[in-house]
Amino acid sequence: MTTPTRVLSPVLAAVARHFRGAGALLLVAAPFLPLAAQSVPTVAEPAKSDTVILSPFTVTSDTDRGYQAGNTLAGSRMNTKLSETPASVSVFTAEFLKDLGATDLADVLEYAVNANADFNAVSTAPSFFYMDGGLLNSVRVNNRGLSASRTIDFLDTTLPMDTYNTGRFDVSSGPNSVLFGFGSAGGIVNAQTRTADFRRTSLNFNLIAGSWAAYRAEADVNVVALKDKLALRVMGVHDERDTWRKYASRETERWSAVAGFKPFKGTTVTAFYEKGDIANPSERPYNRVDLLSFWWERGRQTIDNTALGTGTGTVNNPSGTRGIGIRNSWVSNDGRPMFIRAGSANTVLYRSAGRYESGMASGIPTQRQEGATYQTLLPTTPQANGLPSSPYDINYYGPEAVRTNDINRRFFKIEQQLGRDGFVEFAYNREYGYGFSYQMSGDLALYGDPNLYQPNPDGTATRVPNPRAGQTYVEQAWYHNIEAMWNKVYRGTASWRFDLGRWGDHRLAGMAERSESTNRTTQGAEILVNSTTRVPIMNTTAPENGQNTLFRRRYVDPYAPDTHYAGSRFDTRPITYGGVNYVGRFITNSNANGAIREIDSTMLATQSRFWRGRLIVTGGLRRDAVDLTPFSNGRIAPNDPRVASGEKIAYEYELLGEDPANIRSYTFYTYTAGAVLGVTKGVSVFYNESNNNGAPQTNRRMLPDASLPIPPEGTGRDYGLILNFLDGRLFTRASAFHTESRNDPTVRDNTFILAHRRIVTAYRDNGLISQAEADSRFLTAYLGDFMSDLTTSGYEVEVKANPTKNWTITASYSYTKLKRSNLGQDWYPWFAEQKAYYGRFPSTLLTTANLPISTEIAQIETGVQNLFALNEIGYNNRPHKANTFIRYSFPESGRLRGLFVGGGVRWQDNNVLQRDIVGFDALGKDVLGKILYGPEIFNVDALIGYSTRLKAGLLGRGTTLRAQLNVSNLFDSDRIQVIRLNRVGDGYWRVVPREPRNFRLSVSLGF
């Protein structure tokens, strides 16, 4: 007899060979196929006395219809109809996620009411990772113009979200202390994990193939061991794809298991475990920087670099070149050092310069201030003058820049019903994430080599011919980053319902929670050390100093952009200079940081219904007691045993233990209050106000002492109209909102603290201060963070509709105004003290940037002022957003039964970029003109599919077969997202290209 097992087992074995972990999970599931293929008996309707009463802390999808959710926890912490929730909540249902073909949070964000992926949206920091603010998070969220928090099952998380085990996403906008005492003022995005189903055994498999060799296999196996008593659900995924960018392949291997047990009536025990391994590229979304065009336009001249003096940073306008500075460059093409040193003209090297580079007399009328950043990106298409192009479809970090994550989560929960009206719940959650990445530092640029001569590898001041004069090259330094995060939560929750008749129906809930989180981060560059003594090549007491950094240079064909990445970090050939052998070694620098955060929380919430449900009132009070304990860092002593063993080198940094001198404790009291009033049948008005305190950002440090920032405070209010017609099949929420986030530390730019450290280093190198005094002035833990306040206001409209059985629709529109104020409250007093300190020493000393200290100071002052002016205009906000997604299923009675079609449109307004610079005042500060905007976003997606329940055949009666094709960016729009223009607004500086048209074909089987 032909059975589903006999048919599918060979297929699953083939899948396992290709998809490894997920395929293996399918093989494990194969023996259960006959059980799942059996007809499932109809479950009798329980007698009235046996009616199952759901916990108020649990939401199921039973009332979801198409793209319209019925209930949510995201408004009041209790199971509430969306039409009775005063807080602004939007839900992505399982049906929507399936139709969209979404695999992670980034896929759905642009269909949210007022959210998008955050590309440093409220920060002008020039450096960012594509879709990633850290090693662990898969995507950062911007909601209502502010950063938003991410939770899994309403528990704070750092783990990446994946739809393989997610039932739905809830987006709660604005601060809401009842929902989360600590979170971002922008709101939260919560992923609800699927739970074990006690009713029926089922097996679901989903295979996806897409553009750029994308393959994904998912399995979801639910086994009922004892009906209505014991069930186990196992889910797994293997996802691998090359992506549209070369050297940017991704791979995900995750599985999870959730068990449900009901030992007694009214008692439910849930246990969950997840483990995963994720490999992604370390990448920047933009192309290479133009540090080539000025030299190129002057005929790619080669120069006698030894005839231009001893200055390592000298500008040479006639040839379009400039000095590189002191540097250890090693040419990977032929294994030779090109080490640049000061003091002799024969040990100085030059590089090409770009037309927009500061200090170059390139004929560009905007070149009015030597110290400004006028760089731009190379063109993406071939140019008439032969200037090399740099297309977006390449990750210019190359194939060795990778980021790996190990994740682990455990969750345990006991729910107990007390009579008809009482419930208690005890929960424990523990998650761990570890991330390791190799990335590149230095300019992401393409250079030309104009030098006829190069420094002698023997270390003497005798020049030797440069065999690669006139060629193009790339040159960057490798560095590594390690991040580890632990989160633990213990939570007890209880609720009781009081029906007081004419005085209302009330539910009272209380919660006590203990949360503990620890994060540890270290990073550092590859430096050159003596292969025998492990002593750094130049600065022995500060290994992280740039004079020790190893830059790996690689000469490339200018017209083969897929070769434009630096030398390999796996290259172990000896590096000989001055008769001494050196090797590359990764060290830890001063950015070693971390902290322990402990929060004890109590919460009391109420939900009351009056006038037969016409008036719903919610409220809550919460207390959070927070202890923050940062870790300290320090240099490793030369006599440390790890130095002798070779594990560490002397004077490199390490992350130490707790720093009791900088422990911070806070106690916060927050509230939520709201109401929904039914004016007529189907028409309600609502009002909600709340506040909260954001989780302190332990990866930030503030002036004047590089201490942890105080927790930001969020306040907000929403009010508007709810329309609910056609027996709930047409739902509309129209809201106006106003949100404030005070003490926000999201502005980061380390340019100025680096200049400060160069000044201090110059004092030390000239014998004016000791190394100890220099260390005390460096503020090594400070990363360039600035405190400010943010305010957003606007309005939103969301529509969810199922007008007929065949149509399901979601649509939204929003407007947001963003303003930043009070920027620099921590900077000005600190810098005033530094200027008094600088005044004690000569201002003519040169720093390692080959600039006089007086120039460095002037550039710090004007640069900070310009940074603040840029941020105060609502940087990168897209005021207007709109989207819709529609699906139509053909009637069951027609010839096209089973067929469904649909699609969506995503539109976002022009984003605020910066102010035009129309001149400079007497102090060199920008004189600003009009606001400049980037292009809008407009994309169309399409869906076509077929679904049927088989009546017979090889796969078995009752098997559900679904096949669908998703097309993202249907019209193949190549319009980029511009994040920053160059300083004068006439060239791109930071961009995020749009993924080209993408096809995904999925086939699902359900038994």
Image (cartoon, helix red, strand yellow):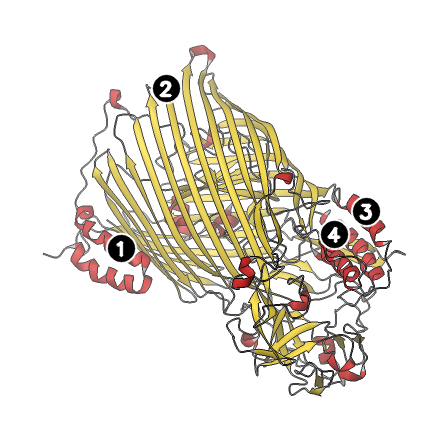
Marks 4, 1: nearer the viewer: 4
* Of pointers 2 and 4, the one earlier in the residue sequence: 2
State how far apart marks 2 and 1 are (Cα).
42 Å
Label 3: few (<14), some or many (≥20) within 10 Å?
few
* Rendered image: mark on residue 833: 3
Residue type at mark 2?
Asp
State how far apart marks 3 and 1 are (Cα).
65 Å
Q: Is residue 139 left or right of residue 577?
A: left
Say if 764 sits above or below 222 in the image.
below
Marks 2, 4: nearer the viewer: 4
Say if 849 sits above or below 778 in the image.
below
Percent position of residue 866, x then y: 77, 53
Q: Nearer the viewer, residue 402 or 338?
A: 338
Secondary element at tag 4: helix
Q: Which residue is mark 4?
A: 777
Say if 186 sits above or below 122 in the image.
above
Q: Nearer the viewer, residue 369 or 835?
A: 835
* Of pointers 4 and 3, the one earlier in the residue sequence: 4
Marks 4, 3: nearer the viewer: 4
Label 2: few (<14), some or many (≥20) within 10 Å?
some
Q: Which residue is mark 2?
A: 421
* Of pointers 3 and 1, the one earlier in the residue sequence: 1
